[in-house]
Image (spheres, helix red, strand yellow):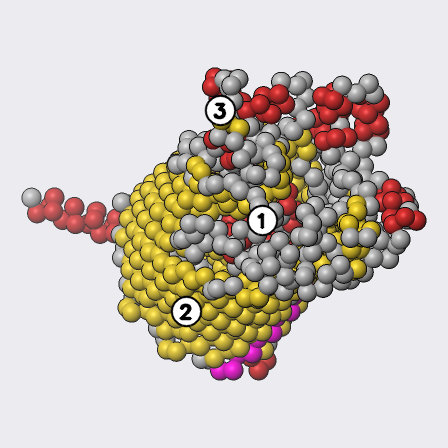
Amino acid sequence: MKRNIATMFFAALCLTQISAQNIVRGIVVDNQTSKPLQGVMVSLQNQTTKTDPKGVFILQELPTGNQVLYLQYDGYQAQQFSLLFTGSPIDLGTLRLQKKMEEQTNSNIISLTDDELDEDIGSADNIVGLLQASKDLFLRTAAFEFSSSFFRIRGLDSEYGTVLINGVPMNKVSHGRPEWSNWGGLNEVLRNQEFSAGLSASNSGFGGFLGSTQINVRASALRPGGAVSYALSNRSYVHRTMATYVTGLIKKGWAFAFSASKRIAKEGYSDGTMYDANAVFIGIEKQINPKHSINITGIFTPVKRGKSSPNTEEVFNLKGLKYNAYWGFQKGKIRNSRIKEIAEPIVMLNHYWNLSSSSTLQTNLSYQFGKQTNSRIDFSGSQIEGSYLVSLGGSNPDPSYYQKLPSYALRQGLPNVYDIEKTFIKDGQLDWSRLYLANAKPQNKGLAAYLLYDDRSDTNQWTYNSIYELALNPKSSVQANVLYTKSTSAYYAKVLDLFGATGFLDVDSYAAYPLQQNNLLEPNRIVSEGDDFKYKYQLNTSILSAFAQFKYHTLKTDFFATSQFGQTQYQRIGQYQNAKFPDSSFGPSKISSFSSYGFKFGALHKLTGRHLLQLNFGHMGRAPKLNTVFTNPRVHQELVPNLSLETITSADLSYKLRNPRIQASITGFFTAIRNATEVSFYYADGISGSGRGDAAFVQEQLTEIDKNHSGLEFALETQLTSSLSLKAVASLAQYIYNNNPTLSLKSEDAAFEFSSRPAFLKNYRLASGPQQAYSLGFSYNDPAYWWIGATVNYFDKIFIDVAPLTRTNNFANDSGIPFNDYDPELAKILLNQEQFDPYLTVNLIGGASWKLKNKYLSLFVSVNNLFNTIYKTGGFEQSRSANFRSLRDDKALDIPVFGAKYWYGRGASYFINLNFRF
């Protein structure tokens, strides 16, 4: 017995000594910068640890034999090493992790272009700009694979997300969306981004229900060194050059950063779409002492570009994918009539104060000013003869205007349909010379029948906020924020080009006598180039808000709770006295005030180190956006009826799997939007009971809108080898109207009457991009520092934006009397919502990097829609056939005259970037 005990003791002692020497250690660094990586997950069998601030890890008491060591870090390619433990320590030395292909794409050369994020081509609601900082597979795929299809996360547009630069919110007060072009072309200094997805906590503010992106451009936080790059593309711009230099923190506590770029194209992917953009960034920081630091940032990114037109299917079939009705040749050069220009510099002052080892206070002051302009042609020129207003004979110069198309000629029974079709196919562009000839007629007496003008807004905005953070103890912390914004915007029309004439009579030629005067204070004014005319008013906005947040975490559970309260005020100040509304157009309106609120909470529970459950819930009541407060601020100060807070309630539940080879997540979500408001402007035919005929240019207010957004999100990524990974992503959702909102119509004709009534929209789908999207792809990162990847993407359940007016009782009757030939079954078919065809795209991506001593050269190439798939990304029904008879007759034609208008995705496109970093 004693002998057996002694033998067992000796064996255990030997095993202990052998196990004690089975140790592995190493240092993990970034492959390009050689900087240590803190927080890298290191695992071997059942042991897991993380690297320390110096990138060092140690695992001890490991079993003898063959084992596999895994390294895993967000944004980097996972690595694995086969090791043989024989009782001796193993020192792996320095291990280099290479950024994932997606991360290289994101941080180096984001290939998104401004027109993909611009509201005027049907992509206002594209939220891809919010997602560029995300390392989450689903969100990253939405940003880089689904963006060209204008896919929206959870069916929400970008006004439900928040973008902050150095802690200052950048969403526009007018419409609530970030103005991406205000910092476009500055990719190099926008690398430091922190994305808080959905309802999750954000330390800088309450955030949006879609999430928030915090961009840190503090000079000392930017990566030191220089970079120059050149890009070639066939998308919105053709050429891009960029140069950046950052000193990092140097002697006496100074840090400097500079970046500049130029993007240009005589013609982008769509015909006639010029592009000219510049960008300059300057950052200066002074660290006064360990507690105080001052940072000054200046950003100026002026952009000027030609727009592209939405087209009916008839126009698309005749002219093709790239056709754009907005341009024509003038003296042999392309000239676009619809130019958008944005020039809104930002100046920002930040004070960083380390109050103690556990608390900080950041105070920010930001000033933004500048202009936004959108040009168009006016063809309403007139002159006074005696006491009468006489038209100078202008007509709509749009080459795709319905009266110039074959479908209209067929409907009218004209004999020259074929000639009209041939002419449109051969040319079909804007005829600039005709405008000059029309203005040169002697009988015009120098007055213009046609002119080019800008709809312009000049904005001055001050923003102040303070962000306080306090670590109560190692497990809990609080954050608080106070924000004040004051914005003043002047809106007016400005004459750009009189096409050879000497003046333009500033009256409304469509109004009845004596209501033609746009400004009674200066009647019958003749305006020249550079003058304001038509309308002029100012909108003032002030926002005061505060938020507080509590965060608590343990080894098993993370929890947060957030609340927000605010006050928003709007006021209109008219600077013209419009003859149609003399008592409500000039001077200040009453101040409209709205008290907003919000709260949200969430918890992440770690069932094990690899299995996680996450729950988030939020509710808020937010003030209506400025562009939905007034029915038509150009001519009067009348408020949209039934205006009150929009409320949003949202919840999501996620399961996440994390292990060295497989990462997966599945999320279920539900969002209820209540009491939303939308305002739109259009020309309608078939209006009954207005007292002013059956056609008018109207302002539509759709109020008390309820919407439901629900669905599932799935993402899976598996690491087959240290270099090869596969990914699969899916979104299955449904976005619908949940009620029958109230529709009101107004017109600039004061005698126009159209009583408020329900629009029967319940269960119609929202035009929120693809409601089903799938992606399957692979990426290969070679140890020799080149990479390649491909994805196949499939989109379905894409719906047109329906016309609410045709879903009211106006559709079925004439001045309250039902049509005697009304057919309910046919009406149901006519009002059926169009669903676009599903489609599939293939995207390729690849690149390589080379280290040249302590410098780096990298090449990046992407090809989108490799097989040139033609697909519709969005569209809207016209309201030119607003009742049963007119819509029935139009749709009975082989080619409808007033068919829906569509936006189409690009065909095959490419982006190539060469980057040199030193």
Please determine whether, in this image, residue 310 is positioned above or below residue 30. above
Q: Residue furthest left?
A: 1
Mark 3, secondary structure of its residue: strand
Around disc 2, counting alpha carbons within 10 Å, would you say few (fewer than 14), some (14 to 19), or many (20 or more)?
some
Q: Mark on residue 818?
A: 3
Q: Earlier in the sequence, mark 3 or mark 1?
A: 1
Q: Amino acid at mark 2?
A: Val
| Position of residue 714 in the picture relative to residue 896 (left or right) | left
| Position of residue 370 in the picture relative to residue 409 (left or right) | left
**Which range of residues does the magenta coloring cover?**
280-289
| Position of residue 82 in the picture relative to residue 18 (left or right) | right
Q: Which residue is mark 1?
A: 750
Please determine whether, in this image, residue 483 is positioned above or below residue 314. below
x and y percentages locating residue 186 in the rendered image = 64, 59
Could you say which is closer to the camera, residue 309 or residue 552?
309
Please determine whether, in this image, residue 540 is positioned above or below residue 265. below
